[in-house]
Amino acid sequence: MSAFEWDSTKEEAAMLIAVGELTNDEISERLDIGIATLYRWKTYQEFKDRVKELKDAIRKEIMDTSIGDIVQRIRRANKRWMAIDKLIAARGSSLECKNAPGGDTGLLTYDMKVIGTGPMQQTVEVFTFDAALLREERELQKYVSQELGQWTEKQNVELNGNIKDMSLEARQKEVEAILQAIQRKKSELSNENTQ
C-alpha cells in the first residue's frame, strides 16, 4: 500500500463515518468519490484511528452537553414539569373554567360542543378531567426520581410455607429472613443505580 496522505475530502469522509448517519454509498456520492476509494481509505490504520478519535469526541460531546448528561436530562424534565404546573395554574384562573365545578383546580380541559340539529341545535361547554396531564406529571416525577436513584419498585416476597402453622420463634426467624432478603435487594438496586 502507498503512503496515506490526508486532505479535506478524507477528513470529511472520516467525519461522516464517525457520525454514522449515512451509508458508504451515500458518503461516496456526497464526496464525489468511488465506493472502492472509500473502502480503500477505511483499510488504512491512520484513517481508522481518525474515525475512532472523531467518534470518541462525538460521544464525549453528547455525554457532556445533551441527553447523555444527567444534569441536562433533569433540567429538561424540570422545565416540562414547571410548564405543566404553569398550564394548570393558567387553566385554573381562566374565565372559561372559573365557574365550572373544580375549574379552579386547573385540572379540567375546556371545549365547546354542538349538540342537536336544526332549530334544536345548541352549543354547550364541555369540561373534562385531564387525566393525561396528571399521568405525564407523575411520569416526570418518577423519571427524575429514577435518574437520581430515589425510586425503588415494590418487591413481592414469597414466604416459605404457611406462616400460620409456625411457632412464634419460627415466625420471627421467617420475618428476619424476609427483612434480610429485602435489605439485600435494596443494596443490589442501590449498587446498580450508582454504577
Image (cartoon, rainbow, N blue to C red):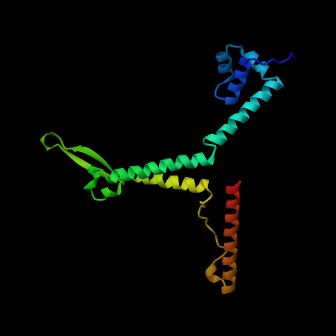
Q: Give the percent coordinates (x, y) of residue 132.
A: 42, 51
**In which quarter of the view is residue 175 placed?**
bottom right
For image coordinates 52% across by 55% down, the residue present is: 141
**Nearer the observer, 107 or 65:** 65
Residue 11 appears in the picture as rendered: yes
The image quarter in which residue 56 lies = top right
Q: Is residue 139 above or below residue 117?
A: below
| Residue 144 to residue 18: above or below | below
Compared with residue 190, is residue 136 higher up or lower down, i.e. above or below? above
The answer to whether one can see residue 132 in this image is no
Where 115 falls versus 169 (above or below)? above
Tell me where residue 42 appears, x and y as whole percent: 78, 23
Indicate the quadrant containing the N terminus: top left, top right, bottom left or bottom right. Answer: top right
Residue in view at x 35 percent, y 50 percent: 90
The quadrant in which residue 47 appears is top right
- Left or right placement of residue 167 versus residue 73 in this view: right
Residue in the foreground of this view, choosing between 176 and 136 = 136
Q: Residue at x 83, y 26 (%)?
A: 45
Query: Where residue 64 sits in the image (x, y, percent)?
Result: 66, 42
